[in-house]
């Protein structure tokens, strides 16, 4: 008898395998360039082509970056580590094996913490190890053949494997974003999923809520953007749930995400289960990582996003939300701090960055690094508001002009005659005009409809083309109306 | 130590070797003999010996992260059985199945 699965509630169990391309100039075991977008097979040599008799030598920067990342992920750095050969055949793998790490990986037993729906979730890092990338296969527009470009073969990767601690897609996405932030902050990876410098392979399974054992897991490959990571996982969990509800069983397999159809399809089935016959790489000598080197790297770690966020809240007394937005990138956080150093009113700076600046950057598709307004001028604009030279409203217009032309706020204000009118005499003239133009409203106000004050303020501001000091207008209007 | 015919088939498949039925029988016998011979080492007590993965007494050999000139693509592709537009041309790789 088939047990009915209709009422069962399922829980997802997810682990993520992330490959991060390390930002070195040259490949992991040879001097070929790692630059993206070069002509096919123009960045290869006998070593990365796997010619007989060549000898790979480890790029020191790869080790440094890997140790740095491991420490940032709270991993134990193995004092003794070595490389291994992972043997398999594929057209993009010139040697017939990939140099990777198997036993004795460089980093183990770490974790990262990420905020999911307002709560901090700790996700374990099983291991992180160094390896070389494979080449690239191209199929598009080719009928009977595939093309192989080996420029990517030998590019350094750090494979970061999480524990299966993730219980929802929200958590998986949060983990991935946090991990990317950390890698980018550490300056070890550019985090670009579209160019393949960050790749994510989730493995997912479902189990009835309350069950301790994991269900059979499926590994997903071929996902090349953040948006698709989420979509692919959603699709796969729906698929698995349907199979289970219909009384079926999940096959342990690798499935490929199909971007056009937005579905996952089987890649390799179990009968060809991985049999990589790992063994220690005889061409590379072992690594002995001295304790003082680990300490040196640890002391040189930059402030990570989490720590920065906490410090912003503490030091600048801005809301958590502001701190989160401002620490999205290291450059943006730096911009904020540079502005606050000149104009020490953090909340005002934060407001202007989050609304005006981020909107302009967004509209022009630029990064903060390309921002045409240096912090000095940004702060300069805020000073002009504070000392009453211009109104907040006018300042927004000035800001747009600054962004467009890269000119200083003082220059723009002077040239366009935008200086705020604070002179009582000048404002009174405007008020007289407005009151004369609206005798009915004035009468209503006198009879107690005092909420009309806002209307009058608006009219005066309009007449001054936004240049009147709103505080002054308010004050003088009240006096005038109750006279 | 005995290596079965199925194990010979599996290893041959992993190594992309085509072997005939007679060869499978012969290899099964020969490989078993080799394994038995090497298996003699199991008679030694190695419980107090550090595992050796490298015969050289060396560690931490590095190169600096400096870009050096690569080969010209024409040289890279010189040994390739087939090529097209500076790519290696290989039989169509089927990555999907439905």
Image: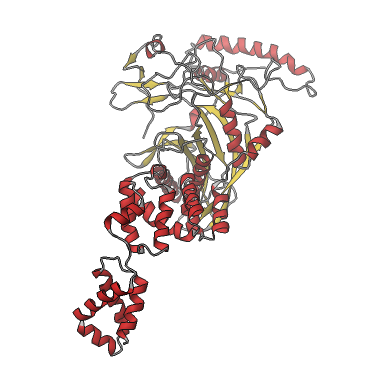
The answer to whether residue A445 is left or right of residue A253 is: left
- Judge whether B67 appears above or below A117 on screen: above
Q: Return the x and y of residue A131 as percentages of the image width and height.
A: 54, 27
Where in the figure is residue A381, as x and y percent of width and height? 39, 56
Q: Identify the residue at horizontal 66%, vertical 38% (top origin).
A: A76
Q: Is residue A8 visible?
A: no
- Relative to A425, A243 lies left or right: right
Q: How many marks?
A: 0
Locate residue B57 relative to residue A230 in the image: left or right.
right
Residue shown at the point (59%, 28%) measured from the top left: A101
Q: Position of residue A193 (x, y in %)?
A: 42, 38
Can you see residue B26? yes
Horizontal and vertical percent position of residue B25: 56, 11
Vertical relation: A22 (above or below) A96: below
* Residue situated in front as seen by the camera: A96 or B44: A96
The way the protein has been coloured in the rendering is: secondary structure
Quadrant showing the C terminus of chain A? bottom left
Asked if residue A215 is positioned above or below residue B20 in the image, the reply reads below
Q: Nearer the viewer, residue A39 or A274?
A: A39
Which residue is drawn at the image coordinates 63% and 32% (left, top)?
Answer: A106
Residue under the image location 33 percent in, 52 percent down: A411
Say which quarter of the image contains residue A437.
Answer: bottom left
Q: Residue furthest left?
A: A437
């Amino acid at each position: 008898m088939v047990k009915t699965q209709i009422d069962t509630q399922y829980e997802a169990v997810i682990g993520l395998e992330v490959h991060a391309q390390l930002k070195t100039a040259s490949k992991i075991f040879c001097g070929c360039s790692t630059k993206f977008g070069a002509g096919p097979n123009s960045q290869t040599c006998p070593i990365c082509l796997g010619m007989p008799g060549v000898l790979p030598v480890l790029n020191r920067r790869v080790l440094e970056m890997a140790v740095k990342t491991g420490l940032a992920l709270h991993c134990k750095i193995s004092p003794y580590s070595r490389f291994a050969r992972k043997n398999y055949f594929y057209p993009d793998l010139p040697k017939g094996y990939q140099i990777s790490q198997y036993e004795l990986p460089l980093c183990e037993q770490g974790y990262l913490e990420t905020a999911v729906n307002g709560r901090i979730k700790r996700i374990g890092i099983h291991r992180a190890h160094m390896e070389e990338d494979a080449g690239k296969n191209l199929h598009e527009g080719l009928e009977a053949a595939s093309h192989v470009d080996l420029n990517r073969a030998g590019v350094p990767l750090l494979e970061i494997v999480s524990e299966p601690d993730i219980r929802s897609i929200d958590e998986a996405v949060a983990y991935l974003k946090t991990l990317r932030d950390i890698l980018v902050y550490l300056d070890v990876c550019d985090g670009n999923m579209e160019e393949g410098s960050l790749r994510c392979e989730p493995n997912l399974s479902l189990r009835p809520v309350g069950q301790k054992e994991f269900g059979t897991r499926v590994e997903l490959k071929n996902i090349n953007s953040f948006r698709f990571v989420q979509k692919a996982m959603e699709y796969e969990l729906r698929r698995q749930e349907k199979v289970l509800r219909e009384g079926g069983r999940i096959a342990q397999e690798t499935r490929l995400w199909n971007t056009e159809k937005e579905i996952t399809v089987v890649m390799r089935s179990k009968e060809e289960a991985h049999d990589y016959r790992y063994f220690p790489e005889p061409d590379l000598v072992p690594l002995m990582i001295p304790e003082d080197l680990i300490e040196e790297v640890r002391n040189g770690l930059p402030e990570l996003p989490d720590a920065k966020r906490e410090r912003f809240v503490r030091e600048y007394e801005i809301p958590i939300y502001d701190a989160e937005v401002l620490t999205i990138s290291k450059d943006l956080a730096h911009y904020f701090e540079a502005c606050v150093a000149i104009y020490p009113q953090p909340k005002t700076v934060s407001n202007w960055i989050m609304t005006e600046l981020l909107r302009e950057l967004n509209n022009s598709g630029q990064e903060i690094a390309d921002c045409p307004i240096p912090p000095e001028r940004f702060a300069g604009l805020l000073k002009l508001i504070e000392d009453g030279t211009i109104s907040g409203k006018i300042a927004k217009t000035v800001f747009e002009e600054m962004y467009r032309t890269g000119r200083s706020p003082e220059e723009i204000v002077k040239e366009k005659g935008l200086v705020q009118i604070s002179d009582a005499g000048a404002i009174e003239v405007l008020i007289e005009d407005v009151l004369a133009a609206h005798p009915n409203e004035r009468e209503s106000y006198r009879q107690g409809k005092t909420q009309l004050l806002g209307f009058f303020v608006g009219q005066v501001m309009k007449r001054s083309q936004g240049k009147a000091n709103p505080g002054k207008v308010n004050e003088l209007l009240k006096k005038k109306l109750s006279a | 130590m005995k290596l079965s015919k199925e194990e010979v088939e599996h290893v041959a498949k992993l190594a992309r070797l085509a072997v005939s039925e007679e060869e499978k029988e012969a290899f099964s016998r020969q490989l078993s003999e080799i394994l038995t011979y090497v298996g003699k080492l199991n008679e030694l007590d190695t419980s107090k010996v550090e595992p050796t993965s490298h015969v050289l007494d060396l560690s931490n050999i590095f190169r600096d992260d400096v870009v050096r000139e690569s080969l010209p693509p024409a040289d890279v592709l010189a040994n390739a059985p087939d090529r097209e537009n500076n790519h290696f041309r290989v039989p169509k790789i089927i990555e999907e199945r439905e």
